[in-house]
Amino acid sequence: MEKHSMRHLLWTALFLLYCSCGCLAAVVQQLPQKGESALQAYTVSDTPEEWHPIRIAVYTKFVEDIVNKCKKQRSESDSNPTHNVEFCRGDNEMTTEKMNTLFKDVLPKAIKLHTDRLKVKQVEKSQNTRSAEVNLLPEKCRAIKGNPLGKAKKIPDVDFMIYVGLSDEPKNVEICTQDNENRPTSAVISFIPKEINATRQYIRLTAHEIAHGLGIQHDLMKGLFMINERSDDLLRDEKLNGRNKFYMNSTKFVDVLKKHYNCGDGEANTVKGLYLENEGEDHEKPSHWERRIAKDELMSTYIGEASGMYYSALTLAAFHSMPFYSANSLVRMCYLIVVPRLST
């Protein structure tokens, strides 16, 4: 009787799992093979359809090299100034612990926020592996020129590559390569070592930076006719007089915007688009939602204050307005995260 009850409970649990998930998928960090430890790919298995969850890989070699050089420096001589390596001392020292936090805790969770929600038409072969492309990269992505991608025995097919760098000050995310549809296929994202922390806020901030690499950037969106200049200013901030003002006004985005803020019909409720932030360093080519309108949104500007950083319908609508992304309107899937240890 006991065995029968246990079996009944097991089948009940499995049935509830099936009903709640709809389908079972997996976010998997591919185990590196010999000679390819610098690549960590986070892929999502799903049913064979035209649109597939985006596959994102992380290139870790630059950070690994710095950590290894720091170890060597400490073992040889702490007082030899000729062997000083950046990020080996001071507040921004990059330790093995911080590297593991970034690669094992922060990036997998930040990436999952996007792989849960975004789909692409997957490429048959990674567009980041051709050495000829690497040599033609723009100067802004010079950090990844000459990397040994072409020498690796096997590069996983991915849709987007994150080249992880380090910096002692905030730096804009730089899109490095794009496919034939102009969808970004790689970007450099630099992290400040002293800020690396496996908190919800930092994970969301990392997801914010990844979103810039995936396409939430002024020039790219303007090229897709998603952004226009505006003459009106409902916020009436006299300090910003003379500056160009922009808003997101693609048809798909405005439709979602109206529903998001529960705007009614009629002339008094006319909604033309979402204002973009025109303060701060990127006021000439803003890529963030106006924080006074979308304060707790993932793609609003952050100024050190606590924020919800919610991945709302607004960011989904921005991606869905791009011809190379399909955004899930409702996520009802279960995921299994598998993160193996870093190879040395």
Image: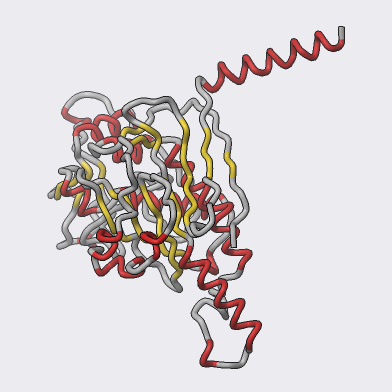
Residue occupying image coordinates x 19% and y 43%? 226
Which sits in the foreground, 153 or 119?
153
Which sits in the foreground, 217 or 158?
158
Q: Position of residue 28 (x, y in %)?
A: 53, 41
Residue 29 in the figure: left or right of residue 217: right
Residue 14 in the figure: left or right of residue 200: right
Q: Position of residue 261 (x, y in %)?
A: 33, 32
Q: Position of residue 229 (x, y in %)?
A: 14, 50
Residue occupying image coordinates x 42% and y 41%? 114
Residue 246 position (above or below residue 188)? above
Residue 304 in the figure: left or right of residue 131: right
Q: Residue furthest top?
A: 1
What is the total number of numbered labels drawn onto the structure image?
0
Residue 315 position (above or below residue 208)? above
Which sits in the foreground, 253 or 63?
63
Residue 264 in the figure: left or right of residue 339: left
Quadrant for the N terminus in the image: top right
Residue occupying image coordinates x 19% and y 40%? 249
Q: Position of residue 196 (x, y in %)?
A: 54, 62
Quadrant for the C terminus in the image: bottom right
Report the coloring of the rendering: secondary structure
Residue 5 position (above or below residue 23)? above
Residue 264 position (above or below residue 77)? above
Q: Residue furthest right?
A: 1
